Image (cartoon, grey):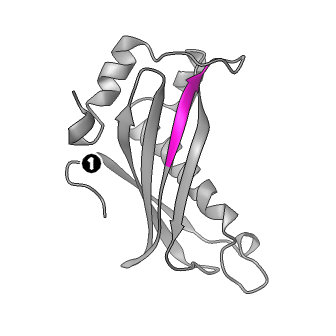
Amino acid sequence: MIPDGAVTNRYEHRVGFHETDAMGIVHHSNYLKYCENSRVIWLETHDKSYSDWMELGLHFAVTRVELDYKQSACFDDIICVTTWLEWVRGASLAMAYEIHRDETLLLTGRTEHASINGDGKVRRFPREDRDRMRKLCLPEYRS
């Protein structure tokens, strides 16, 4: 369930045939791609684009993935990924996701990311960026 006070973004996607397996259902690996696409859109919508972060020399390396599959999507389904920022720390953040087809919950998930530079070394977020992003976190993590 999407928490109260979450700053969300919705991303719609029509499932392509190439995303399905021999049974005509979405291959499990594609759900993480849907979350990734939605996370990039969330950043652009609510903070700054991933390209802007790259210009600062920062990337968001995935350090943890949790996906809980509830139902399957099939070819030609329109799915909606809702995304929100859970928390931001000095050099990391966590995003959460729900994927629905109409009113049917297909997946819940979350990813954690480390802020790294181009050499793959952990790098703290600049204070002003971290402070700005904390205002977008779940209410219990905003301070």
Q: Residues within 10 Å of mark 1 (few under 14, many from 20)?
A: some
Q: Report x, y in % for residue 102.
A: 40, 78
Q: Nearer the viewer, residue 66 or 5?
A: 66
Q: Which residues are magenta?
A: 111-116
The residue pinned by badge 1 equals 6
Magenta stretch encompasses residue 13: no
Q: Amino acid at mark 1?
A: Ala
Would residue 22 appear left or right of 42 to someone viewing this image?
Answer: right
Q: Main secondary structure of the magenta part?
A: strand
Looking at the picture, how far across and down is residue 31, in whole percent? 60, 62
The percent coordinates of residue 109 (x first, y second) are: 48, 58
Q: Quadrant of residue 122?
A: top right
Task: Let me know if residue 112 is in the magenta part.
Answer: yes
Q: Residue at x 54, y 65 (%)?
A: 13
Residue at the (21%, 27%) spot, across then down? 143
Relative to 111, is 133 above or below?
above
Q: Secondary structure at mark 1?
A: loop
